[in-house]
């Protein structure tokens, strides 16, 4: 699994000019899934996201998690995170899981984040053409790949 995590003051997802999900202060998580992703990846990544200390404490130091600040998380599927640009100029998405594999993993990931966060997590719609709007706070943007746990 690959994610891009952005600390936001607000974020939303529109489909066909209708807002389907929105959050205020918290994390926008763009997630890409590949065939080899497992429940172990889901558990590790969801715990990492909920406990990632990227929000300022009273001293202005990034020392608090989204859970600590009672913030929100918005999860949006994004297969293009698995783009390969090695050859040519047209990205290949061969590493991105097909919907029949990706959707169950995506849904389990959402449930796991909700469980750890203790609240409902709004999402985009898997496979839909979405417009994602956000105000990146900081800006703070972090990339995590479960196949490369650095």
Image (cartoon, grey):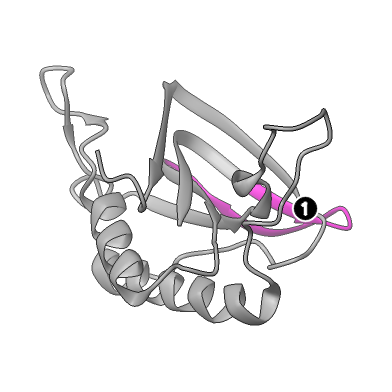
Q: Position of residue 85 (x, y in %)?
A: 69, 33
Residue 82 is covered by the magenta coloring:
no
Give the quadrant of residue 35: bottom right
Q: Which residue is mark 1?
A: 130
- The residue lying toward the viewer, choosing from 93 and 141, is 93
Vertical position of residue 100 compared to residue 84: above or below: below
Image position of 149 (left or right of 82): left
x 47%, y 47%: residue: 3
Specify start and end residues of the magenta stretch as a single range: 12-25
x 27%, y 45%: residue: 149
Image position of 38 (left or right of 134): left
Quadrant where the N terminus lies?
bottom left
Vertical position of residue 139 compared to residue 28: above or below: above
Give the quadrant of residue 126: bottom right
| Extreme-left residue of the structure | 59
Q: Position of residue 103 (x, y in %)?
A: 60, 76
Image position of 41 (left or right of 122): left
């Amino acid at each position: 699994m690959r994610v891009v995590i952005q600390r936001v003051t607000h974020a939303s997802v529109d489909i066909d000019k209708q807002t389907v999900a929105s959050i205020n202060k918290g994390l926008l998580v763009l997630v890409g899934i590949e065939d080899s992703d497992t429940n172990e990846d889901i558990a590790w990544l969801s715990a990492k996201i909920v406990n990632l200390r990227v929000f300022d404490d009273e001293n202005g130091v990034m020392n608090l998690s989204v859970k600590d600040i009672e913030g929100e998380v918005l999860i949006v599927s994004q297969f293009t995170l698995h783009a390969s640009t090695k050859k040519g100029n047209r990205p290949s998405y061969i590493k991105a899981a097909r919907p029949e594999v990706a959707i169950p993993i995506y849904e389990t990931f959402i449930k796991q984040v909700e469980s750890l966060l203790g609240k409902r997590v709004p999402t985009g719609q898997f496979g839909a053409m979405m417009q994602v709007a956000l105000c990146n706070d900081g800006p703070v943007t972090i990339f995590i790949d479960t196949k490369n746990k650095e």
